[in-house]
Image: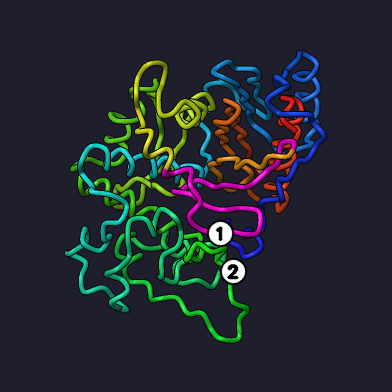
Amino acid sequence: MNTRTAKFFIVALLFCVGLTSVSAREPGWTADDAATLSTLVANGQYGRVTSLWIERHGEVLYEQYFNGGDAMTHHNMRSAGKTVTGMLVGMAIADGYIDDVNVNAADYFEELKPFANDDPRKQDIRLKDLLTMSGPLECDDWNNFSRGNEERMYLVEDWSKFFWDLPIKNRPSWEIPEDDGGFGRLFSYCTAGVQLAGEIVERVTGRTAPEYAAQRLFAPIGIDNPRWNFAATGKAHLGGGLELMTADWARLARLYVNAGKYVDTKVVPESWIAASLTDYVRVDENTNYGLLWWRPRYRVDIESFSANMMNGSGGNRVYALPEFGVVIVISKNDFRDREAHPKSDRLFAEILTRLGLD
């Protein structure tokens, strides 16, 4: 997503129905639900879906593949992989390599100093600013004119230097002031910042991100064949270059539904999950952002919940709904479809309806 209009890709997920009580009705799923959903997807109702996975409380209710995909297909879910980079940060903190998310990011890049366009505010950029897309640098993938747009980053070899050499963003007086929603932060979608967060993990652990992920995250949950995309320098693309099978994306989301556990093995610290699924910055009137997790709001009966979401261009989505024990994976190839995300929103709404959660 690299256009300004993409900023509004999330449709208001406010599904209000007259259920007596969400807790009084056990969500259901029938063979008819599965058949109807398969027909809708196969007919292109929700775009070019390649796989769809729905599970509840660890039971896979629906697993189907479309448009040439199958169970062994590795899906590059694009920016959904950013959330995995956030998981690696959390594990590096748990392993004692990083104190916390408030460390100064610039301290890990002494060899690149002095930075171009140097400014004291660069020294105050925290790891948390990178994980919440709310730093002060002029980095906006949703603005084609932005100096920090990810497409410009891909044109140079050293992505860390690219980030640190960016100027401080300007907020001209004639623009309508942005509403920060009371968070004290302003959202600016910045792939380069996520790449830098992953680079910090590599520097503190002494391992490449793929190596650290394989040992610390993937192996314990049974992911044994991840595929990464790499820059010319050999650095893994940590802002959208991870390819996994559909079941693997579901395993990662399941950790956030099961308080960090995979079966009986504790993998992701529960404290990191709680921190990640907390609102830190406002994206728009219906969506907040956690630590590399999207947090669009939706409503069940009279209660409002956040649909924790890994999100990637083309309408790719991975949802973790711990309130209901639900994991949903939607992989798609709608990379040039302006309606890719609204179609995924509608598919998500359809799934909630058929689970009895609308």
Q: Which residues are magenta?
A: 275-301
Residue nearer the viewer, 300 or 195: 300
Quadrant in the rendering for residue 191: bottom left
State whether residue 280 is above or below residue 67. below
Q: Earlier in the sequence, mark 1 or mark 2?
A: 2
Residue 60, given in percent of the width and then of the height, sits at: 60, 17
- In the rendered image, which residue does mark 1 sit on? 282
Which residue is rendered at x = 69% and y = 41% of the image? 344
Which residue is rendered at x = 56% and y = 36% of the image? 318
Is the residue under label 2 in contact with that under label 1 (CB below 8 Å)?
yes
Question: In this figure, what is the number of numbered marks?
Answer: 2
Q: Quadrant of the N terminus?
A: bottom right
- In the rendered image, which residue does mark 2 sit on? 179
Residue 130, given in percent of the width and then of the height, sits at: 39, 57
Mark 2 crowdedness (10 Å alpha carbons): few <14, some 14-19, many ≥20: some
Q: How is the image coloured?
A: rainbow
